[in-house]
Image (spheres, helix red, strand yellow):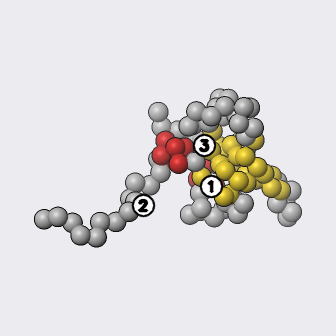
Amino acid sequence: MALRNAAVAAAGQWVDPDDGIRYPAGEVHGWERGRNETVCGLSLSRSRLARFPHVSWADVQPESGRHAEEVQDVCRRCRAALGGRRDDRGWTRTNPRP
């Protein structure tokens, strides 16, 4: 199940003083509009996550920097489910075997 236009659910929020629009802060998760759970399976109400239907998943990635000023953590399971980059490995092989 590939979600192309996932929105964001987050643990916190901040309001941009210039335009008055609220944006996600803290830990962010991927969320499909019309569902009551995140992509990784957390219930929105039980986890007390706020929905941000006007913010796309690509905009909260630290690499984009668009709405990611207050984002502190991106859910690893949601990132993997929504097509995280596979070439970004957390390790490197320093001495490969022949």
In the depicted structure, whether residue 90 falls above or below residue 78? below
Q: Nearer the viewer, residue 6 or 11?
A: 11
Residue picked out by circle 3: 30
Q: CA distance from mark 3 to mark 2?
A: 21 Å
Residue 97 lies in what quarter of the image?
A: bottom left
In the depicted structure, whether residue 47 falls above or below residue 27? above
Determine whether the residue tagged by mark 2 lies in a helix, strand or loop: loop
Residue picked out by circle 2: 90
Please report the residue visible at 48 percent of the width from the left and 37 percent of the height from the top.
2
The amino acid type found where label 2 is placed reads Gly
Going from N to C along the chain, the mark reached first, 2 or 1, is 1
Residue 16 lies in what quarter of the image?
A: bottom right
Q: Is residue 69 visible?
A: yes
The amino acid type found where label 1 is placed reads Asp
Q: CA distance from mark 1 to mark 3?
A: 12 Å
The answer to whether the residues at label 1 and label 3 have Cβ atoms under 8 Å apart is no
In front of the other: label 3 or label 2?
2
Q: Position of residue 38 (x, y in %)?
A: 62, 36
Going from N to C along the chain, the mark reached first, 1 or 3, is 3
Q: Position of residue 39 (x, y in %)?
A: 57, 37
Quadrant placement of the C terminus = bottom left
The amino acid type found where label 3 is placed reads Gly
Residue picked out by circle 1: 73
